[in-house]
Image (spheres, rainbow, N blue to C red):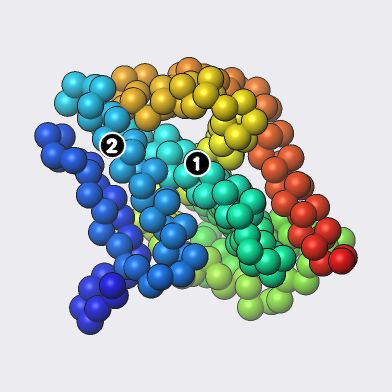
């Protein structure tokens, strides 16, 4: 339970090779807690199987595949919760929560990555990088990604300054794109498991047991998806569209 002086959030660690992984988190007995636990258990499973299957030297794994394991679990939880929802209102909440995960991770984090790239390109071209320049650059990207000019959404001017409180731009250079790629692969792999069953499960174990024995691109290939094709992206977009269709169906009743 949350307590005075206790850190917020949650994390799983499996860095002690000869000891089982453990999770520290804050449990508030709601859906967010369940979702967080499922996420952290993905990391825990990854550490457990990698430590059991790999020698110490290759037991650790990169962030690229780490976030596949965690968000894969979130996908399976979402599918289970939607199928077992006790009411249309509950189902709508779960669908909306997962849609927001897809939006903020696949679209927003990709936008963050593009913003970060453009900042570095300014420096490479010996152009000044001021707060005003960064705000203008960020605002233009948000409007582009969210369809401001086409009237899809309205992006208020204050959003231009949102970049200033995102620590990843300062502390984790060229890091955020991995959130997007990992969730895309996780969603695609989860869809394969849901639709194909045990064969897809066995393929997925190649990531959990792989550690750093191969490059991430090769581990993903062994899990049943060609990472250099559009398959994972198409499966994820189909999932996203299906969720929006389900939401609209409920709202139109």
For label 1, count other residues whose C-alpha is less than 10 Å away and answer few (under 14), some (14-19) or many (20+).
many
Residue 26 at x, y = what percent? 32, 67
Residue 44 at x, y = what percent? 31, 43
Mark linked to residue 72: 1
Element at label 2: helix
Q: Between residues 219 and 156, which one lies in front from this camera angle?
A: 219
240 to the left or right of 205 = right
Residue 84 at x, y = what percent? 61, 55
**Residues at marks 2 and 1, CA–CA distance in whole angstroms:** 15 Å
Q: Between residues 107 and 209, which one lies in front from this camera angle?
A: 209
Q: In the image, what residue occupies the spot 49% across and 26% down? A: 201
The quadrant in which residue 14 appears is: top left
Vertical placement of residue 7 versus 172, above or below: below
Q: Between residues 149 and 146, which one lies in front from this camera angle?
A: 146
Who comes first in sequence, dot 2 or dot 1?
2
Q: In the image, what residue occupies the spot 39% across and 43% down? A: 42
Q: Between residues 172 and 105, which one lies in front from this camera angle?
A: 105
Residue 22 at x, y = what percent? 22, 49
The quadrant in which residue 17 appears is: top left
Residue 34 visible to an observer of this rendering: yes
- Quadrant (top left/top right/bottom left/bottom right) for the C terminus: bottom right
Q: Which residue is mark 2?
A: 47
Residue 178 visible to an observer of this rendering: no
Mark linked to residue 117: none
């Amino acid at each position: 339970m949350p307590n005075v002086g206790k850190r917020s959030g949650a994390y799983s660690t499996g860095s002690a090779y000869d000891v089982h992984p453990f999770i520290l988190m804050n449990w508030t007995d709601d859906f967010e807690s369940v979702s967080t636990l499922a996420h952290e258990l993905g990391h825990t499973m990854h550490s457990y199987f990698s430590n059991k299957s790999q020698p110490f030297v290759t037991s650790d794994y990169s962030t690229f595949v780490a976030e596949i394991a965690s968000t894969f679990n979130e996908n399976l939880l979402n599918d289970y919760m939607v199928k077992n929802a006790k009411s249309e209102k509950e189902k709508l909440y779960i669908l909306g929560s997962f849609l927001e995960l897809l939006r903020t991770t696949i679209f927003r984090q990709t936008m963050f990555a593009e913003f970060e790239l453009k900042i570095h390109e300014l420096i490479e071209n010996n152009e000044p990088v001021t707060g005003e320049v960064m705000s203008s650059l960020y605002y233009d990207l948000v409007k582009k990604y969210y369809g401001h000019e086409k009237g899809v959404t309205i992006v208020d001017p204050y959003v231009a300054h949102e970049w200033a409180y995102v620590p990843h731009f300062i502390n984790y250079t060229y890091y955020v794109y991995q959130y997007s790629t990992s969730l895309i692969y996780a969603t695609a792999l989860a869809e394969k498991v849901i639709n194909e069953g045990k064969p897809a499960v066995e393929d997925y174990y190649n990531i959990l047991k792989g550690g750093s024995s191969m490059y991430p691109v090769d581990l993903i290939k062994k899990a049943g998806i060609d990472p250099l094709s559009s398959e994972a992206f198409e499966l994820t977009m189909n999932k996203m569209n299906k969720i929006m269709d389900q939401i609209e169906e409920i709202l139109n009743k």
